[in-house]
Image (cartoon, rainbow, N blue to C red):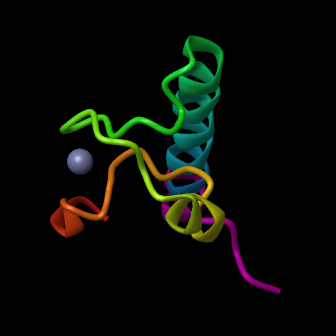
Amino acid sequence: MAEITNETVASIEMTLSSVDRALERLRAGTYRQCQVCGRAIDDADLIADALLSHCSEHPELA
Ligand SMILES: [Zn+2]
């Protein structure tokens, strides 16, 4: 059985904070809005990654 390492915990914490930020954007009504340039994020991109916070113009942030 795999051991739970600090990296595992760090990765879980990162995922949790991504979920938190996505929920905050949902509540604020900015879920579909790119956090970098303000454009609407494509539905297909959000379906592929529900925690996406930026549009396809910023591939370096993915
Ligand atoms: Zn953008």
The extreme right residue here reads 1
Image coords of residue 11 (percent x, y): 53, 57
Question: What's drawn in magenta, residue-wise?
Answer: 1-10
Comparing 61 with 7, the one in front is 61
Image coords of residue 4 (percent x, y): 68, 66
The extreme top residue here reads 28
Residue at 62% in and 54% down: 50
Total number of numbered discs in the rendering? 0
Instruction: Give the image quarter of residue 1.
Output: bottom right
Q: Is residue 17 magenta?
A: no
Image coords of residue 7 (percent x, y): 49, 63
Comparing 37 with 23, the one in front is 37
On screen, residue 41 above or below 25 = below
Q: Is residue 7 magenta?
A: yes
On screen, residue 26 above or below 8 = above
Q: Is residue 3 left or right of residue 8?
A: right
Residue at 50% in and 47% down: 14
Q: Is residue 61 left or right of residue 21?
A: left
